[in-house]
Image (cartoon, rainbow, N blue to C red):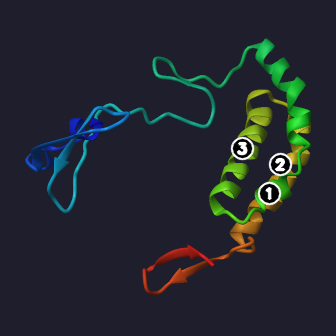
Amino acid sequence: PHHVQSFDTHTQHMKTDMFLRTTTKGNATACVGNSWTMVEKNLPVNIGFGPWNPNTGTEATLSNATKQRIRHVAPSELSQDISRQTNLNSMYFSGKALNKFAMLVYTVYELVKDASLSESAFSSLKSAFARFVDNRQIFPLVYDTVWKGVVSS
């Protein structure tokens, strides 16, 4: 339903009078066409990885209380077995684990400003990520010549 609001003039003409009530998003509009063009104006372009506020933009500073809380819990989080948690038989869940640790290392290093606390986990994270860069994961990626795309082996 929210996509219709972003349709350009040409795509607006592809809408039909048919609707389907979705379970979570309201009425979905049936559209006929091979492609849609959507236009979004005034999208923020200054979003990074850190905290962000739609009114003020990037907020790369945390309160001292927040930093202290992160320093308190980060050691147990960073001491987890990054290699084991990211070496799964699922690209999806391996990627989620890589993201979890990357965000944690980023938060401790960039926002809490504690390089020494993040150093060991960062090294483990780089090794875990290299497994995917080098295509050495449990099910390496291969090119499927029938479907013309990359798939897990």
Query: Mark 1 highlights which residue?
Result: 126
Identify the residue shown where x is 86% and y is 54%: 124
Mark found first going from the N terminus, 1 or 3: 3
Could you say whether the residue bearing mark 1 is in a helix, strand or loop?
helix
Q: Check if mark 2's residue and mark 1's residue have beta carbons within 8 Å.
A: yes
Disc 2: CA contacts within 10 A as few (<14), some (14-19) or many (>=20): many
Query: Mark 3 highlights which residue?
Result: 100
Which quadrant of the figure contains the N terminus? top left
- Give the residue type that dot 3 points to: Lys
Disc 3: CA contacts within 10 A as few (<14), some (14-19) or many (>=20): few
Q: Position of residue 148 (x, y in %)?
A: 43, 80
Identify the residue shown where x is 73% and y is 45%: 102
Q: Which mark is residue 122?
A: 2
* Residue 136, above or below 81: below
- Give the residue type that dot 1 points to: Lys
Of marks 2 and 3, the one in the foreground: 3
Q: Residue furthest bottom?
A: 145
- Give the residue type that dot 2 points to: Phe
